[in-house]
């Protein structure tokens, strides 16, 4: 009798446990408003997918789309998506980023663009990317307001997340045009590009340029790509006149000389001398050396220097004698 009672009690307890087994006990959570949620984006066959997200704070922006200014207020009623994208840059380095923003197709629709074969996106530094209709219409092609949880600094990213080429992405996007149309700056943007009063425009090319190997000395210490990794990269168009009175314009891309000297620990100098591999020298005073317009250029007109040499380009100077090519040594004194 006791054994029968114990058996019945055991069966009763088992039934109670089974009845409770449907409850997981795991609480649900909601994303608070004003944050950028991170949603796991499942990858199928290596292709990115778009996941709609809620509770995202949309910062102010203005993009000119085919002649019409589209703002954050224009897009307020459109869904926001998150896409995880993997791309490879020109140096072969692979990176994976999470973009959050509006589908490009929705942005085009908001501007009244109904049909097109190509779409061109333009950044505030003049860099442009063109994609075909299929890429533009893909739900994974975003006008992104954040990248890896950080909002843009000036204007949104253009992120065609199906592309595995880093060069197809751009930051600081201010304009979109279709079918070869001319991209236009937003009317609400208070900034004007180009040159003002003869001062050249400085364009930020950080994260858009990968330099070939270079090497030079700063006060006797070798400087290479690794030494300057992490410094901002700039591009400036400089117009100079040579000794024969001939005028030419060249594009220099590299680091601010003042940033290079700081990275190398140079302090308290009053002048800076650049020495070429053939013995030619130029000397800059403190004001010129520390100017934001003076570059230690790794490229000139997209060409690298011979045998890893560099240029010193004081881009406010109009005489070619102030520039130095084939630079192998910098002396801050």
Image (spheres, rainbow, N blue to C red):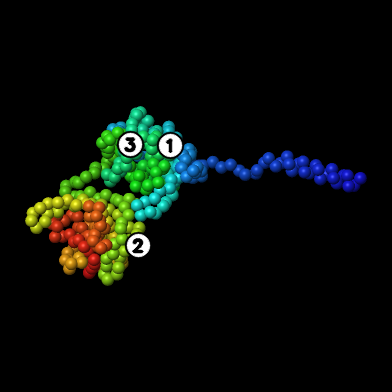
Where residue 254 appears, as percent x and y from the top left, is: 27, 56
At 84% from the left and 43% from the top, the residue drawn is 8
Q: Quadrant of residue 297?
A: bottom left
For numbered disc 3, what is the local secondary structure? strand
Q: Alpha-carbon distance for marks 3 and 1?
A: 15 Å
Label 1 vs 2, first from the N-terminus = 1
Does the CB distance between marks 3 and 1 fall below 8 Å? Answer: no
Residue 191 seen in the current view: yes
**Residue under label 2:** 226
Label at residue 139: 1
In which quadrant will I find the C terminus? bottom left
Q: Is residue 106 above or below residue 169?
A: above
* SS category of the residue bearing label 1: loop
Which residue of the protein is positioned furthest toward the left in this rendering? 244
Residue tagged by mark 3? 119
Image location of residue 292, percent across then percent down = 24, 56
């Amino acid at each position: 009798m006791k054994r029968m009672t114990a058996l019945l009690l055991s069966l009763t307890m088992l039934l109670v446990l089974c009845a409770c087994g449907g409850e997981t006990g795991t609480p649900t959570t909601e994303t608070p408003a004003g944050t950028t949620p991170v949603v796991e984006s499942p990858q199928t066959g290596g292709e990115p997918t778009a996941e709609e997200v809620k509770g995202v704070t949309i910062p102010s922006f203005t993009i000119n789309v085919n002649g019409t200014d589209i703002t954050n207020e224009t897009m307020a009623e459109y869904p926001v998506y998150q896409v995880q994208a993997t791309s490879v840059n020109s140096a072969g380095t692979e990176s994976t980023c999470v973009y959050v923003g509006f589908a490009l197709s929705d942005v085009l629709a908001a501007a009244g663009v109904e049909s097109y074969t190509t779409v061109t996106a333009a950044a505030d530094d003049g860099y442009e990317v063109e994609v075909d209709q299929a890429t533009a219409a893909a739900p994974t092609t975003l006008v992104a307001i954040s990248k890896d949880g950080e909002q843009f600094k000036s204007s949104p990213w253009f992120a065609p997340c199906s592309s595995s080429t880093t060069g197809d992405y751009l930051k600081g996007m201010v304009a979109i045009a279709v079918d070869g149309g001319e991209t236009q700056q937003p009317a609400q943007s208070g900034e004007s590009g180009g040159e003002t009063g003869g001062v050249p425009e400085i364009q930020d090319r950080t994260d858009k340029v990968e330099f070939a190997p270079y090497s030079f000395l700063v006060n006797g210490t070798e400087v290479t790509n690794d030494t300057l990794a992490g410094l901002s990269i700039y591009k400036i168009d400089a117009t100079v006149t040579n000794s024969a009175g001939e005028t030419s314009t060249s594009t220099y891309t590299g680091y601010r000389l003042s940033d290079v000297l700081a990275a190398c620990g140079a302090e308290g100098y009053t002048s800076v001398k650049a020495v070429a591999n053939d013995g030619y020298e130029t000397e800059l005073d403190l004001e010129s050396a520390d100017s934001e317009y003076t570059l230690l250029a790794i490229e000139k007109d997209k060409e690298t220097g011979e045998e890893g040499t560099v240029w010193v380009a004081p881009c406010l100077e109009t005489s070619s004698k102030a520039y130095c090519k084939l630079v192998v040594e910098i002396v801050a004194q």
